[in-house]
Amino acid sequence: MEEEVKRLNFLEEIIEDDLKSGKCESILTRFPPEPNGYLHLGHAKSLCINFGLAQKYGGKTNLRYDDTNPTKEDTEYVDAIKEDIRWMGFQWEKECYASDYFDQLYEWAERMIEQGLAYVDDQTQEQMRENRGTVDKPGVNSPWRDRTPEENLRLFREMRDGKYADGEKVLRAKIDMAHPKMEFRDPIMYRIKHASHHRTGDKWCIYPMYDYTHGQSDSIEHITHSICTLEFDVHRPLYDWYIKTLGIFPSHQYEFARLNLTYTLMSKRKLLELVQKGLVAGWDDPRMPTLCGVRRRGYTADALKMFCDKIGVTKHDQLMDIQLLEWCVRQDLNARSNRYMVVQDPVKVKITNWPAGQVEWFDCPLNPAEPEGASRKVPFTGELYIDRADFMEDAPKKFFRLKPDGEVRLKYTYIIKCDKVIKDADGNVTELECSYDPSTKPGAGEWRSVKGTIHWVSCDYAKKITLRNYDRLFTLADMSQVPEDKDYKDFLNPESLVIGSGLAEPALLEDASGIAVQFERTGYYIKDKDSSEAEVIFNRTATLKDSYKPE
Ligand code: ATP
Ligand code: MG
């Protein structure tokens, strides 16, 4: 039997080796967000990798909040992150917090002090930077480096007890100020920060550094494969060093290439700035690359997973084409979304031979891929709207939509012919007088085909809706290439949101699918939470047509 064999990515290879060799019995991964912002598309990749690998190999994944930086973190983010992970369809094994390990980390720090492996340093930040040396130049030992363990212990406890101001002292690992790897030049383990923590409150005024926290947290939870982005590879030796020095469970770190997307920024710091400066309407503005933003835009979790699957897992950084993501969104929605007709730039069509006052209800499939599936009822009356772009007075030969004396099919219904064009004093078309051919009703009699089919809406039944037509937030393809003399905000797209309106068939307002719908022949749209009785708002998820094809 022919079957497409998918090559393993490098992480799968590592895991299969580890399971085969018995290095681990089952795998446990973790997803470690810092609760200082909302999750974005890059995190979706990390989620798909961490949860995806565990699912594939019968393992589990912990959710671990990397919350060692009290001034930037908040429970608002903690809650939002959980909501986003659930929306992606992933279920974590344990909900953990680095801050739950503060006591243990503190105890280990005291142990390192007692063993002469850590010391309290009084140098200022400036002095520490100067004395760190460079890649070509060894660093200089701190004058406080040879304090006795007793003195260090006393000072460290005083730091913990709040005797010193922020920045007055730090605790450093005593390794080697001439080490060829800069990260080993007596890295800081603890700094003083008189700040309330979102979970531990005012219990602590010293907080552990990332490097002193992450490996140990993995180790405490018995994480087998700690997977992170490439920029952490320089941290790995220190990760291993702390674990080895403390003699604790040997977790291992592996790095993959982070996701970069064209026309997109994914730094939480910059996204926060956009929110705080009011340049977008919040973290969930549909133009934001956040998971709550793309969700509000109408992207589906399945589309994101399809995208992550397509881009794969590699070890070199790459700028991915956002068109591939948009393609995945269209693929997914094309298969699933309900169809409705909406006219955006209306011109009136009068059917002159339609019996006055008559309404005919057509049963139209919600998805053309399932003609026998669920349907909606669409009313046909003597006055209709069509889109202005579907009519042309001096039409070229190849124009197969409506033109004077020409015929077109009104989707799901009759063929009509344009008999007369009515214009205002300025020459603008205001109305088209047409006649319909009753014999062309689908299913009744012989099928007669014409080249063009257009969408339409009954004037009497049309519902007015507001459209938020979104486009890319930035105009620069590679947002890592913002020139020196410019700011990333100089590349905000002034047309990233264009407000429009539409006239919709009535069934649209009854749609209960919960995902984006297709406005036939134009695009995918999703109802926005800002909608009210008075104003129903739809966000554009994606336009329908695109010439892009993935390789
Ligand atoms: P940012 O730079 O946007 O603040 P971060 O790396 O600080 O992101 P964390 O909350 O620390 O954000 O990230 C949680 C996990 O998601 C980490 O393992 C991190 O490596 C991963 N991650 C973050 N950004 C990306 C990205 N663009 N592509 C893939 N994984 C990412
Ligand atoms: Mg981080």
Image (cartoon, rainbow, N blue to C red):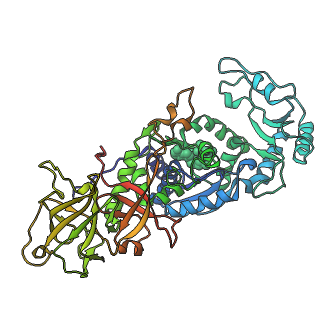
36 up-or-down from 409: above or below: above
Quarter of image, res 359: bottom left
Tell me what residue is drawn at x 35 percent, y 60 percent: 344
Q: Position of residue 284 (x, y in %)?
A: 55, 56
Tell me what residue is drawn at x 77 percent, y 54 percent: 197
Which of the pair 17/429 is nearer the observer?
429
In this view, the residue farthest toward the top is 137
Q: Position of residue 286 (x, y in %)?
A: 50, 55
The answer to whether residue 365 of the structure is visible from this angle is yes
165 up-or-down from 345: above or below: above
Q: Position of residue 126 (x, y in %)?
A: 79, 26
The answer to whether residue 227 of the structure is visible from this angle is no
Q: Position of residue 508 (x, y in %)?
A: 38, 71
Quarter of image, res 120: top right
75 up-or-down from 168: above or below: below
Tell me what residue is drawn at x 40 percent, y 42 percent: 321
306 relative to 265 in the view: left or right: left
Which of the pair 315/24 is nearer the observer?
315
20 relative to 341 in the view: left or right: right
Image quadrant where one finds the C terminus: top left
In this view, the residue farthest toward the left is 446
24 relative to 263 in the view: left or right: right
Quarter of image, res 151: top right
- Count of all numbered marks drawn on residues in the image: 0
Image quadrant where one finds the N terminus: bottom left
Which of the pair 25/125 is nearer the observer?
125
